[in-house]
Image (cartoon, rainbow, N blue to C red):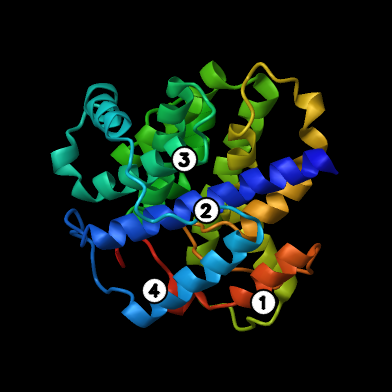
Amino acid sequence: MHTLRIYRSKSLLILSSNVQSAFHLANMNSLQSENKTTSLSSTTKSLIKSTVHGLLEKRNIPFDTNSPIDQALYDDCKEIFESKFHFPLSHYPFFGTCLYIGVDLACSAFAHLPRCNQVHIAFFTAFHMALDDQYHQIHEQLEGFSERLVKGSAQDNPILAGLATILFDTNEYYGRLQSNLIVTSTLDFVASLMMDLEIQKMESLDSPSFAAYCRLLSGISVAFAMFIFPKDIEIAGYIQCLPHLNTYINGIKYDPFDPFGLAPLHPVSDDYHCAVTCFHFTKKNLRVTTRTL
């Protein structure tokens, strides 16, 4: 049980760091937001902040929205972005916002990892965020992503190409089983975006099990759970905690891709019950992506 408490705290730390990122970006006044369309009201922001603060306080985890980003890591990532992915950040201003959140998550929730892992996590997060924000515009290319990835073919979109590169690099930082789980978690996320387009005409919205299934696909929880553990730790020592980690990461963490879009799952603990009760908002009212920040 002690081990489970440690992993549970790490999952809540992911929540804390992502919420901090959201408020950092709100304070930046969307300097890089060509995609901006709307903004959350101050009342809504205060409600989110107080709700999350109450949950973190219960777990004795500090809530500090003023903690500075690791500027050195951010600068390194910007240089790598231009040199490795071969297109300047100035041509894709929306990606700067995504990368900011990725760096903030990597240097806070994953500060225990080597620098190279943090860079990988920052880009992994950033490319997933960019894809989530842009998939309506590139849905035709998105549909062939998995097939091209399996065949080793070139992706015909810079976001998809960058995401594929990050997946190919996963074996450098994580073991084979970890890497497989990270890659399949991404493929599930891509499938969830495709599904989102396919089910627009779905007549019934009353199935809680389907909502939970969509969250399982879109949450990328398996990947972020695998990121917690360095490559040199035997996976047999923590793999049994993966279902528990998934529950916490999917149900409690602030998700930059689908924030507070919680499915009505059955509570498995007091903390989880508290989270579901407090965060049972709709996507329409609380969807926070680079467009709304």
The residue that disc 2 covers is 62
Q: CA distance from mark 2 to mark 4?
A: 18 Å
The reply to whether residue 220 is visible in this rendering is: no
Q: Secondary structure at mark 4?
A: helix
Amino acid of disc 2: Pro
Residue located at (70% from left, 25% from top): 177
Check the picture and name the quadrant holding the C terminus.
bottom left
Q: CA distance from mark 4 to mark 3?
A: 22 Å
The answer to whether the residues at label 1 and label 3 have Cβ atoms under 8 Å apart is no
The residue that disc 3 covers is 108
Residue located at (72% from left, 74% from top): 208
Q: In the rendered structure, which disc, 4 or 3, sits on the residue that comes first in sequence?
A: 4
Q: CA distance from mark 4 to mark 1?
A: 18 Å
Q: In the rendered structure, which disc, 2 or 4, sits on the residue that comes first in sequence?
A: 4
Q: In the rendered structure, which disc, 3 or 2, sits on the residue that comes first in sequence?
A: 2
Amino acid of disc 3: Ser
Residue 219 on image: x %, y %: 58, 53
Side of 225 relative to 40 (left or right): right
The residue that disc 1 covers is 277
Check the picture and name the quadrant holding the N terminus.
top right
Q: CA distance from mark 1 to mark 2?
A: 21 Å
Side of 43 relative to 2 (left or right): left
Q: Secondary structure at mark 3?
A: helix
**Depth check: 64 or 125 in front?**
64
The answer to whether the residues at label 1 and label 2 have Cβ atoms under 8 Å apart is no
Residue located at (59% from left, 60% from top): 56
Q: Secondary structure at mark 2?
A: loop
The residue that disc 4 covers is 45
Amino acid of disc 1: Thr
Residue 184 on image: x %, y %: 62, 38
